[in-house]
Structure formats: C-alpha cells, structure tokens
C-alpha cells in the first residue's frame, strides 16, 4: 500500500530533505506541499529536483483539499496547531515535527484525534540519537533522583525550550520529580539563574552561534555525575530516516503519541 503524504513546511531546512526522502520511497507518494513563498508551482521547481511534481499551496487548508493519508507538520509554532487540527478534520493521520507546542495544545490535539479515530505522532526530534537521549534519561531517572536539563540551539531559534527538551522533561517527569536540595523560592540572588521549571525539571536554554540543536541531561550523586547528551550538526539528513519511519507507523495509531520511540522496539 502506498501512503499519500501532504508535507507542510516542504521547502524549509528539514522539510526539504524530508520531501526528497519521501520522493525516493517506493511506498510513499507526496501529493501536496505547503510553502507560502513557493505556492503555485511544483515542489521540484523550488527544490531543484524536477522529479518531485507535488503542487505547492500557500496554506494547509488549500493543500488538504487533495486527499492524503498522512499530514506532516513542519512549519512554525504559530501555525502548527491550526494545521494539525485541520488535517485531523480532513481525516488524515498526522506527524508533528514542529517544536513550540505546549501541553494544552497537545491535549486539544489528542481529544480531536481520538474523536476522529486518527493517530498523531509528535516527535520533538526525529534523530535516532535524540530518541536514545530521551530513552536513556528515562532509564537513569528511575535510579538517580537529581538532574537538570540543558537545551542548546542556534542563536536565532525563537522558541525555548526546544521541542526535544519539552518532550525530554515531560517524559522524565512521568518517571519521578527530581529532588532539589534548595527549594527555588529559597534561592538567594537571581532566581532566574536557576532556569525555568518544566514538568518538574530545571531547564536552562542556551542560544548562541556555533550550536545547531542539542540537549543534555546531567544527573548528580555525591562525588559523581552522569551526562547524557545529543548534538546535531548542520545537516537535516539525520532527521529523515526517523521522519519516514513516523509516517509509515502513524496510521496504526489512535490519539496522540509523544516521541519516536513510541513506535520503536527496544
């Protein structure tokens, strides 16, 4: 069976590589794409690959007029929620790669997905090393009671923390709440220096040139520490294999599922 895919954000940094990956897959067919800058032309014209003939639309609503099995959301936090809900209303399963959606957004998405009998697979990061960072951090949190999280990204990334770190903190918070030696309200000096609290974890976001995307969990015990860190380079290629896997697996799901490891076997 060939899955028909609509890709929102098809000309972006990650979306363009994914579009090429879909086009090269015999079991997937790219039937529509979303890109405001390149609307009205074939996607191949924007990507420099004449073999990719999918039409480009300015918005998700127009693109979803073309029936698809799976809608991939790779745009911007400001439009992601509306795009996902529109796709579900049109009967598509959804893969979410956009970061910046919050717990309330995902609760709404889950409710609509279950009502429609459709699956949503939301992945803060499709890179396999990022998936393992989250899985290994969950395992360590069962044994080590204290940790903090560092979120690394390029200077221009507007959302903080990243989708990867949001997912990481959420998943670790379900294992247990980390112990703080000094309660935050008893901090002397600049309270903000202790970072933000997300699902019980203290998160520190670094936004500087020289970074692309990365995340680190630091665990501590007396006289010993453990660091688990994922770093991404400047290419979007590491995300393609994971995103293709998500596209193939999401039709078997109902409701919201967080993290690529939801469809991996360990």
Image (cartoon, rainbow, N blue to C red):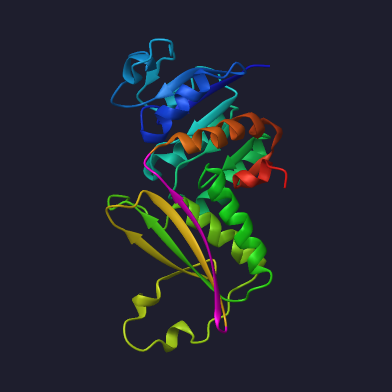
Viewer-side residue, 132 vs 41: 132
Q: Position of residue 81 (x, y in %)?
A: 46, 42
Q: Is the magenta stretch mostly helix, strand or loop?
A: strand
Q: Relative to residue 57, is residue 174 drawn left or right?
A: right
Please give the name of the residue rendered at 47% of the width and 29% of the height, measured from the top-left corner.
18
Q: Position of residue 254 (x, y in %)?
A: 69, 38
Q: Where is residue 256 in the image (x, y as percent from the top left)?
A: 62, 44
Q: Where is residue 185 in the image (x, y as percent from the top left)?
A: 43, 85
Q: Relative to residue 204, is residue 111 drawn left or right?
A: right
Q: How many marks?
A: 0
Range shown magenta: 222-234
Above or below — where is 237 with respect to 183? above
Above or below — where is 50 with respect to 89? above
Quadrant hosting residue 224: bottom right
Above or below — where is 102 with respect to 188? above
Viewer-side residue, 88 vs 137: 137
Please give the name of the residue rendered at 44% of the width and 14% of the height, measured from the top-left corner.
54
- Quadrant of the image containing the N terminus: top right
Viewer-side residue, 202 vs 25: 25
Please give the name of the residue rendered at 38% of the width and 27% of the height, measured from the top-left corner.
59
Residue 27 visible: yes
């Amino acid at each position: 069976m060939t899955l028909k895919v609509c890709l929102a954000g098809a000309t972006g940094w990650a979306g363009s590589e994914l579009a090429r990956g879909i086009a090269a897959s015999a079991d997937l067919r790219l039937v529509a794409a979303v890109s405001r800058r390149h609307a009205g032309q074939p996607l191949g014209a924007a990507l420099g690959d004449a073999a990719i003939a999918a039409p480009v639309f300015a918005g998700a609503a127009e693109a979803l007029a073309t029936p698809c099995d799976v809608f991939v959301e790779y745009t911007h936090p400001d439009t992601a929620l509306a795009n996902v809900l529109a796709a579900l209303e049109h009967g598509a399963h959804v893969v979410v790669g956009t970061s910046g959606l919050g717990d309330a957004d995902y609760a709404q998405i889950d409710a609509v997905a279950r009502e429609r009998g459709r699956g949503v697979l939301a992945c803060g990061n499709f890179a396999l090393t990022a998936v393992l960072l989250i899985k290994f951090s969950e395992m360590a949190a069962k044994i080590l009671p204290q940790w903090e999280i560092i979120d690394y990204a390029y200077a221009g990334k507007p959302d903080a923390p990243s989708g990867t770190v949001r997912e990481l903190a959420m998943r670790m918070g379900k294992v247990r709440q980390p112990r703080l030696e000094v309660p935050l309200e008893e901090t002397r000096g600049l309270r903000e220096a202790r970072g933000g609290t997300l699902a019980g974890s203290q998160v520190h976001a670094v936004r500087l040139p020289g970074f692309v995307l990365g995340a680190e969990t630091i665990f501590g015990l007396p006289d010993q520490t453990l660091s688990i860190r994922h770093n991404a380079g400047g290419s979007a290629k590491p995300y393609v294999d994971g995103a293709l896997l998500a596209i193939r697996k999401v039709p078997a799901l109902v409701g919201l599922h967080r993290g690529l490891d939801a469809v991996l076997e360990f």
